[in-house]
Amino acid sequence: MKDNSVQISLRHVRTIFSILLLLFSFQFFPSMSGAVGNHWIYIAGKQQDQGFFYDRESIMQLSDNIVRVWTKRFGKDSSEVKVLQEVNCTHKIIRNVQVVVERRAAGTLAQGKDNAWRGVVRGTPEGELFAVVCRIPAPESLKNH
């Protein structure tokens, strides 16, 4: 009887350890959780199914003036384009850190990055993103210390 309780306890410890390891990975690698998060908020575009979204849960304050956030838009070919962007709130510039293009049926089609900073233009989806992330402080739990 004693051996069975020890085996059950070891199974529970392994399960708990696996869950903690998974939670730990999302805590210290927030860009992973932003890429797959279901916290997309519509901010621009003619229609919501063709619009521009950002993931509120992925907002990370990198410094006093730089914010990182995942965005998403839909392509004309039914593709989904997710972009990890950095916004410099002081200089009103933005850049793509990572770009992922996916099609529901085909999976990931392409990945890349474009680290060139460019100006934020008012009235564009990125202009709306700038207005949102530079006004709203990132949640304390997501700030990079």
Image: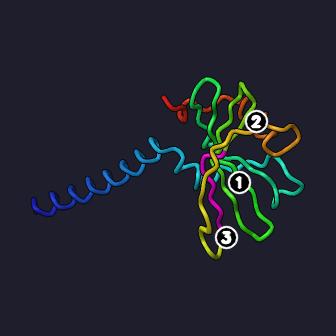
Prevailing secondary structure of the magenta residues: strand
Nearer to me, 49 or 82: 82
Q: Classify 10 Å Cα crowding around label 1: few (below 14), some (14-19), many (20 and above).
A: many
Q: Residue at x 64, y 76 (%)?
A: 105
For badge 3, the amino acid type reads Arg
**Where is residue 79, by image quadrant?**
bottom right
Furthest-bottom residue in this view:
105
SS assignment at label 2: helix
To which residue does mark 3 refer? 103
Q: Is residue 132 above or below residue 3?
A: above
* Residue 28, placed above or below residue 4: above
- Hey, which residue is sitting farthest front in the picture? 116
Q: Which residues are magenta?
A: 96-102
- Of pointers 3 and 2, the one earlier in the residue sequence: 3
What residue would you read off at disc 2? Answer: 130
The amino acid type of the residue labelled 2 equals Phe
